[in-house]
Image (cartoon, grey):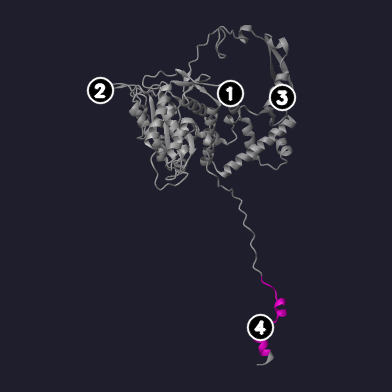
Amino acid sequence: MTPAELNALAGPLDEDIAARPVKRTPVMPPLEDDTPDNHRNAPRPSPACLYGLVGEIARAGSETTEANPYAIAANAMAYLSCAVGRAPFMPVGNTWHHARLFPQHIGRSGEGRKGDSVSLMKRIAYLVREIEPDLSPQIHAGGLSSREGLVFLIHDGYREGKEEIPPIDDKRLWVIESEFVNILHQGKRDGNTLSAALRDCWDGVSLKPATKSNRLWASDPHVCLSVAITPSELLASVASRDLTNGFMNRFLPYYAERTRMLPFPKATPKAEVERLAGRVIDVIKHCSAGPLAKGDSMRVELSPAAADRWRVLYMGELNDRSHGERINGLIERRAPMLLRMAMLFALCDLTTTVEVAHIDAALAWVRYSIETVKFVFGSAQDEHEVRETNETAQKIVAFLTANQRVTRKQITVDCFKGHENKTRIDAALDELLTAVPPRIVVEEDRSGPGRPTKFYELTANKANKAKNEQPRGFAADSSRRERSEQSEVTGQRAEESSQVRIVREQVKASETRMDAGTSHSSHSSPGEVAQPVKATRL
């Protein structure tokens, strides 16, 4: 074989290969995913939730089963809040609160172990009934379908033909609804008023429908609910009106699923159930509960230290509205719920004085519930939007602090340099205007031509300015008062010039002052004696 033939078999030379252009596979740039990451941790309750007797029941029930201890604790609170009755009360202004709770267990089907979480409390409750029949409240686990059906369980008596049906004297009722979705579906039926009846039960209002034909009533009900539902059922079944009409925010939602797997769970020992039943009986006796118990006869109050703790919480996180409109609506009653739970923890300690430890245990439940609401009804995108809106609002507050009184254009151009969108700024301004109390005020200036100009100012600055403009010393107590009104100058256009005149009006002393000895209300007419306000019992 000739050298040329050998070279042909060997293939191209190295220099020929090097001279050829190299074909490279293009490297694809990494994909950019701008969608928000919606992965979040499930709510994690604090061990502070498992306080006192409630904690003992929770630990006993979860020690040998797969039931979540916090779900067991929530059902224990529902039963105990029912068992203590209406005798213990806590006055808040003209409202009297009782320890009524509606815990709402949210968990996936099979994983939530919702049935297991209520089993131990049912065993304890039935044992209490065996030992002390008069102390045990009525238990209904058959579901609810209508207002009339609910009233029938605790009715005031009625006539059936010629027969008089005696009333049910004990108005304590613990309702176990394992399928809360049924209640939600009933509320969507035309003419069904079950959701309204449950709102009244949470408030403690007598169930007396204003109908001529229906005379089935229930006075002073003391109904507590334990309900359970899956997250998907809750989101699919809850009506939009229930999110805003005060129905859903009367429940205490908590997300709880099993924390471990036991192939062979065991029942709580009978001796432990008997011990816990004895503890429960002691609590019920302490509260003087029973069929003949007198309502509102045991006043529960905060200790000085607990009152200080409550004051800080109430002025802070219990009225924090930075969670977004939907979440804020669902947690609107977190403050009274905290007081009810704190009162229950105190009663379980056989005392009528709420201490700081009781407040902190109730606060742990409130925080757990808020995180549950955000986890179930919100999303990562929602939380991102709320966080951005809050940051925008804080920047506006800082800008107003430095510039006092500004226009919307100044906020957009000078504060954000045109880098913030209109929707976000509007949402931030709405948050500041609807805060309690409002953090900013907006005023219109119509003195110039064309469309009126709106000015934004911090509420604190406005209040200080008004305070500085008020008369000092004895002038503030004068029988004369000044009122500013704007009037047009004759012969000139209103938009070109105007002046402010001071109108002095003679006011009788009897019209500007109330005699403390003859008036009890700031809304009373001069010379009238206000009638005493009857306390609302909740």
Front tag of 3 and 1: 1
Can you name the residue that lies furthest to the bottom here? 1
Tell me where the magenta segment starts and ends, as one range.
4-23
For the question of whether residue 510 can be seen, the reply is yes
For the question of whether residue 193 can be seen, the reply is no
Determine whether label 2 and label 3 are within 8 Å by CB. Answer: no
Report the amino acid beneath label 3.
Ala
Front tag of 1 and 4: 1
Can you name the residue that lies furthest to the left here? 162
Choose the circle earlier in sequence order: 4 or 3.
4
Residue 181 image-quadrant placement = top left
Can you name the residue that lies furthest to the front here? 271
Instruction: Please provide percent x and percent y for residue 222.
Output: 41, 25
Q: CA distance from mark 1 to mark 4?
A: 94 Å
Residue under label 1: 305
Q: CA distance from mark 4 to mark 3?
A: 99 Å
Choose the circle earlier in sequence order: 3 or 1.
1
Choose the circle earlier in sequence order: 2 or 3.
2
Question: For this rendering, which residue is in front, 388 or 99?
Answer: 99
Residue under label 3: 494
Instruction: Please provide percent x and percent y for residue 209.
Output: 38, 24
